[in-house]
Image: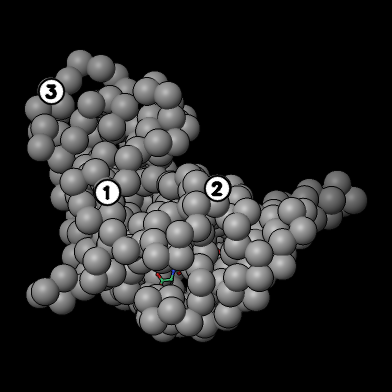
Amino acid sequence: MKNTVLKSLAVGIAALGIALLGAASASAQATLEAVKKRDKLLCGIPMPSAGFGAPDSKGVVQGFDADICRALSSAIFGDPGKVDFVHLNPNVRFEAVQSGEVDLLSRYATVTFSRDASLGLDFSPILFYDGQGLMVSAKLGVKSAMELKGASVCVLPGTTTIQNLTDYFRAKNIKFEAVVVENGDEWRRAFFAGRCDAITSDLSDLASVRAVANNPADFVVLPETISKEPTAATVRQGDANWRDIVTWVSYGLIAAEEAGINQANVDTFLTSEDPEIQRMLGVTGDLGKMLGLDNKWLYNAIKQVGNYEDIFDRTIGPKTPLGLSRGENQLWTKGGLLYAPPFR
Ligand SMILES: N[C@@H](CCC(=O)N[C@@H](CS)C(=O)NCC(=O)O)C(=O)O
């Protein structure tokens, strides 16, 4: 009798455990399910920002950040076009993730300890290694940040930039005046109109600002890099499956470049005898299914959007108006920092 009670209690507890596990994995799948049900990915990107996410003459948003979301859309839907882009000012971007207004911020934020530990956010692997710099008008004749004593500097609120600049200049005993401009467009305009002596942001962002100037040669980026700004995609904390999807699509773009698989040649790799390439492209194994996606998830992303290099070169690389070189954003095999774990 006693035994039977104990047994049924044990069965009951086990059933409860399984039910709880089910509930946990159901809520853990919430973002992917919501995205599939909506038939659209909601992708947070910067305010129109050349090279990262700005509409072209036909109104199609082009840029590195836009393409990261297109790659995700391909991995989820087999179609790069199922993305709605939401342009967000830096000071509202994290709330937009927390509230579910967007499914992610695409490569838009620097990974920092406090953002990770206190804002209910998680990050993908680093998609772009950057650092903060300063840009001035060439006519100012300034050659170094050390010459900016008493200068006014245009900054965007809700970014890492004001704190970095304050810390950097304090250590050097340089006083400056922060001119805080809420919106990206006005921030650029304020600088071009001479409302501040210098503008500060991530170096890639300064290249983007310079690229849209009437005459880019009128502006000079100073030689100092004053911080580390490793940028990544940002997701809500607590949805492990969604984070895995954003993580492995990011790694997949890098791993494809390392394997020599790009948008133009991906089909020739479908007959590759390399077991890792077979798994990556969904020829063998179930990697896609493990993420809740089709096994062709990464094949579709590469075929429809490209590998990391394709995206970089098309949007911000040496042949674009931003003219950025790969630098740290080169594969580890070529002296850079981009490294993807194995696909097995
Ligand atoms: N990486 C820094 C700076 C962020 C930042 O300023 N990002 C740029 C885009 S990469 C921006 O929003 N620029 C304003 C604009 O382009 O409109 C952070 O995460 O706080």
Going by the image, does 333 lie left or right of 96?
left
Going by the image, does 255 lie left or right of 182?
left
Residue shown at 38%/30% (left/top)? 331
Instruction: State the separation of the CA atoms marked 1 and 2.
Output: 19 Å
- Residue 317: tell me if it is visible: yes
Q: Quick check: marks 1 and 2 in contact, CB under 8 Å?
A: no
Q: Nearer the viewer, residue 284 or 333?
A: 333
Q: Is residue 5 above or below residue 93?
A: above
Q: Secondary structure at mark 3?
A: helix
Q: Is residue 234 above or below residue 180?
A: above
Residue extending farthest to the top is 273
Which mark is first along the chain, 2 or 1? 2
Q: Which mark is residue 323?
A: 1
Residue shown at 48%/82% (left/top)? 195
Residue shown at 14%/28% (left/top)? 270
Which mark is first along the chain, 3 or 1? 3
Q: Quadrant of residue 262?
A: top left
Residue at mark 2: 224
